[in-house]
Amino acid sequence: SAVISQKPSRDICQRGTSLTIQCQVDSQVTMMFWYRQQPGQSLTLIATANQGSEATYESGFVIDKFPISRPNLTFSTLTVSNMSPEDSSIYLCSVDGGLGTIYFGEGSWLTVV
Amino acid sequence: GEDVEQSLFLSVREGDSSVINCTYTDSSSTYLYWYKQEPGAGLQLLTYIFSNMDMKQDQRLTVLLNKKDKHLSLRIADTQTGDSAIYFCAERRISSGSARQLTFGSGTQLTVLP
């Protein structure tokens, strides 16, 4: 199984600021994904982080709001820009571990005040 | 998650079996998954099943897949208080833009009563 570490695990942020979340995997993976889980809700895919190219965003999510980096096969970052209280969510990094497996990190719990 | 449906709540007594159900709509789904989310934690991959299988067993967990009815279930034998959590069903679709992304259900809150 893949071990995924996310930083920060929790943060309280001021509205209008930006925060970058890091995701580190203990092995090289081709596919990395970023999901959002709003309070009491299910998970929604934000984007697929592609190594060496631009991220692929889902409907309703844009690069200006959620810029993503994927500098290598074990690391990715998601930035939540110009935050508002509606951005208060859990942000989860996910990887395709091969052989059908998809693993998630512990999540980054953001509260915007 | 609107194409993957789960009931929101399930309560069982400790020691009984729990059965959590899920229905999905996309017949091209390749894999189906069950994840567990405890309070304050991320998602733990419990088990998954390839779409050409109809059953998978792993210790206390049994997954049943009925492709004809597009119905997936997770049975937890001898349910313990530590099994109290939210359980998410998810499907991976070939038809989506990324063949490896998941579509999640709303989650079922399992409460185990002493």
Image (cartoon, coloured by chain):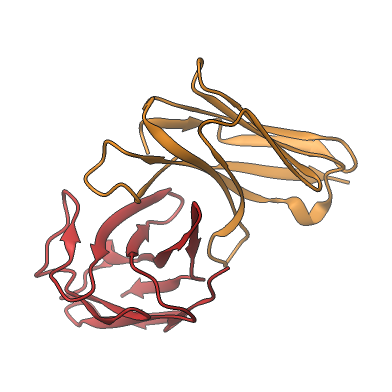
Chain colours: A red, B orange
Find residue B63 and report its image quarter: top right
Seen in the picture, residue A83 relative to B92 is either above or below; the reply is below
Name the residue: 53% across, 65% down.
B42
- In the foreground, A61 or A69: A69
Q: Is residue B58 left or right of residue A52?
A: right
Give the quarter of the figure containing the N terminus of chain A: bottom right
**Tally of marks:** 0
Q: Position of residue A17 (x, y in %)?
A: 19, 82
Q: Position of residue B71 (x, y in %)?
A: 54, 24
Find residue B103 and report its image quarter: top left
Seen in the picture, residue B14 relative to A65 is either above or below; the reply is above
Give the quarter of the figure containing the C terminus of chain A: bottom left
Q: Is residue B40 left or right of residue A27?
A: right
Name the residue: 31% across, 47% down.
B99
Name the residue: 81% across, 53% down.
B81
Query: In the orientation shown, which residue stands out farthest toward the left?
Result: A64
Find residue B16 and report its image quarter: top right
- In the foreground, A61 or B29: B29
Q: Position of residue A88 (x, y in %)?
A: 34, 66
Seen in the picture, residue A79 relative to A43 is either above or below; the reply is below
- In the foreground, A99 or B110: A99
Q: Position of residue B50 (x, y in %)?
A: 53, 39
